[in-house]
Image: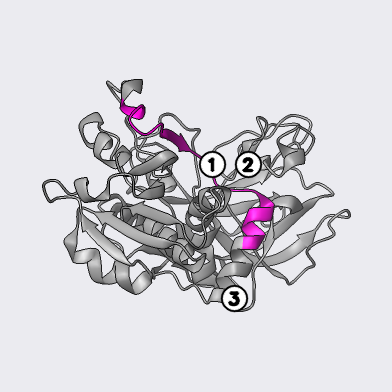
Amino acid sequence: MPYPDQFEGFMLTELGKYQDFERQSFKPKTFGEHDIDIKIECCGVCGSDVHTVTGGWGDAPTPLCVGHEIVGRAVNVGSQVTNVKIGDRVGVGAQVWSCLNCPQCKSDNENYCPHKVDTYGAPYPKEVDQDEVISQGGYSSHIRAHQYFVFPIPDAIPSHLAAPMLCAGLTVWEPLVRAGVGPDKQVAVVGLGGLGHFAVMFASGLGAEVTVISHSPSKKEDALKLGAKHFVSSGEDGWAEPLAFKFDLVLSTTNVLQTAVLKDYLSTLKVNCKFHQVGLPDQPIENFKPQQLTSNACCIGSSHIGSRAECLAMLKFAAEKKIKPMVETISISEKGCAEAIDRVRKNKVHYRFTLVDYDKAFGA
């Protein structure tokens, strides 16, 4: 059965076999009065997709269609939808539903709703879908989402560049703005990849003085081009010593959570400031002692994407500041999905992938 009863996607039937994408049909949730159907134009390839399909983050339901950096056109809107009309270019990030009634939802923290539904691999509650259908992501022909999690895309941002903003961009935007990053702030960005390059552009655009800390000296030119004022190679002995008590925020986008390494990053923080981890590795922090936080009263934190208000503000900021992420494109297909996942897994992308040519795969 074709749309609207069935959507099509490139799916995995077994975690770990991330080269074995198969084109399949799947049933979306029951269409509700607040729902919007989007015919997908493109979708970013996120590190979350890689951690999920490889099994690194644990079990997930299969068959599974990943992808949560989605841009397309609204093709159907529910009777209570007020913010989108048919034909609008819109985006969906890593969340498609929340209760909108809990204290978190009512304080612009719906991304921390205990009942939230992620864009893929999450069951809808029975009151929303009688079959408690599993959400499926954006390596697909369409997506159905609650209007609260559908965002108008500014005309100034091309679709293939807007897509990775909807998870990668928002994931670093939220901690930057919640930390009050702006002029007179010193921000360190650890790692220059998909998340890190967004963090550099946003933090420098907000007026902060940005230092990139990376184990790859070859990335210095990119770091400075993106807006960083300084570049530090973490492969050099004693790299952290000149940076003691320097930063208002250390935003880590890569895995430096090994205890022996982490202490160097913590030492660079001013008193009462935060080391914020947004790159989420497969392994836990081991053998960590609270004593490592006492020399500067620093803390370690993390976060989950961002709120609707923050996403809209980020897109507006990106349009006004002409933020242009470094994005490679690849045509969506069984082969294209497998290649994109494998190259992101091996860090062989500069710096994000967006899957494109959806009309060729699924029809105009």
- Determine the CA span between mark 3 and mark 1: 25 Å
Question: Which residue is at the front of the view, 133 or 5?
Answer: 133
Question: Which residue is at the front of the view, 140 or 2?
Answer: 140
User: Residue 296: within the magenta?
Assistant: yes
- Which disc number belongs to residue 111? 2
Residues rendered magenta in the picture: 292-313
Label 3 residue SS: helix
Residue 278 locus on image (x, y percent): 43, 44
Q: Earlier along the polypeptide chain: callout 1 or callout 2?
A: 2
Residue 293 locus on image (x, y percent): 36, 28
Q: Residues within 10 Å of mark 3 (few under 14, many from 20)?
A: few
- Which disc number belongs to residue 320? 3
Indicate which label's residue lies in the foreground, 2 or 3: 3
Residue located 80% across and 62% down the image: 83
Task: Find out whether the residues at labels 3 and 1 contact each other: C-beta distance under 8 Å.
Answer: no
Residue 132 occupies quadrant? top right
Residue on which the image places disc 1: 304
Q: Is residue 111 left or right of residue 43?
A: right
Residue 55 occupies quadrant? top left
Q: Amino acid at mark 3?
A: Glu
User: Residue 94: within the magenta?
Assistant: no
Label 2 residue SS: helix
Label 1 residue SS: loop
Asked if one can make out residue 344 in the rendered structure from this viewpoint, the answer is yes
Q: Amino acid at mark 1?
A: His
Q: Amino acid at mark 2?
A: Asn
Reply above or below: 293 against 42: above
Task: Find out whether the residues at labels 1 and 2 contact each other: C-beta distance under 8 Å.
Answer: yes
